[in-house]
Image: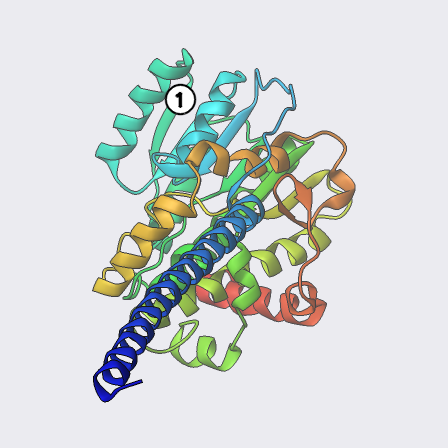
Amino acid sequence: MGVTETCGYLNDRLCEYKGLKLCFQKRLSAELRNAKMIYLLLIIVFLLIAYYITHKIFVQRKTFTGKAKLYGKTVIITGGNTGIGKATAAEMAKRGARVILACRSKQRGEEAVQELKKETGNDGIVFMQLDLASLKSIRSFAETFLKTEPRLDLLINNAALGCPGRTEDGIGMVLGVNHIGPFLLTNLLLDRLKECTPSRIVNVSSCGHDLGTIDFDCINTHKRLCLGSSDGDIFKAYTHSKLCNVLFTHELAKRLKGTKVTCYSLHPGSVRTELARDINGWYMRIIKTIVSKFWATDPVSGAQTTLYCALQEDIEHLSGKYFSDCQQVQVKPEARDDGISKKLWEVSEKLSGMA
């Protein structure tokens, strides 16, 4: 083979090699693209499964199916002009109850009364002004109610908030509205509840109580559940206040033993409400939007466990217990500790002016 032929041969082999190399690179690139697509699809499938599971556990709520009628019964619902409270009020009114919407805003409360009357056909729905951030307002509400209403069969402590600041009595806003206010209101109305037995008290708490703890030094020194005013601090205070609700219910049940007045605390689920309307950091707005769109149910679904605790038959022996998704749920040891619940009661008596 001559030099020319050899060079031609080598050139052909080189071209063939380059062609094979290019073909291999294209094939490898295609396989990598396919692998990436498969990986992406696996991630999407995993996220969908995770979303389904978390939605089923934390968002989807059972429907209360009890048929109890409430003709001749009177119900107080705090925060009954919006969200879970309003949905609860509607169901109580449909069952024939006289419903008292205990709300801070006169305008919004009266608007809710008209809307509920139209929706339910029940004219026995009344607005009574109540500001849980004011001990004076709470006492005035109780005095007016006891003078004008002969019965009280159900007290539903539904109202709650998460915001900085203090009440007019100098108590941390979250502590005052979410615990001290309902504590005082309940105690002022207890005698009427005892006169109308069997009667019930329902305290709307949250699964967030699992993250809460009670710092008695902070409460006694600062009249707050925790220090700081950032969104994170407000969230912490909120979880602490929800633990207060569970402990209050635990202690109240012991004190009501033998009276035929029973009480229950509950987690309503992840619900689209106005609870966090005062937490407005830009990152919190993003979180609230995402949660509202994907991990929150509507107020009607959120009211189902409240209805269960208020109306379910044959749960009197479970007084003081905590419920979620229309069934009893065990709480952590701190949330059922007799010593802590008794101490919280005593501290609450002082802060509410009862002691």
Taking the spot 57% from the left edge, 42% from the top edge, the residue there is 202
Q: Nearer the viewer, residue 325 or 336?
A: 325
In the orientation shown, which residue stands out farthest toward the top? 121
Label 1: element kind: strand
Q: Quadrant of the N terminus?
A: bottom left
Taking the spot 29% from the left edge, 65% from the top edge, the residue there is 164
Is 276 situated above or below 12?
A: above
- Residue bearing mark 1: 125
Residue 165 in the image: x percent, y percent? 27, 66
Residue 193 in the image: x percent, y percent? 60, 36
Instruction: Confirm whether residue 177 shows in the render.
Output: yes
Taking the spot 43% from the left edge, 54% from the top edge, the residue there is 181
Instruction: Confirm whether residue 172 shows in the render.
Output: no
Q: How many marks?
A: 1
Quick one: label 1, few (<14), some, or many (20+) residues within 10 Å? Answer: many
Q: Nearer the viewer, residue 59 or 180?
A: 59
Q: Nearer the viewer, residue 240 or 45?
A: 45
- Classify residue 236 as left or right of residue 156: left
Image quadrant of residue 286?
bottom left
Amino acid type, mark 1? Ile
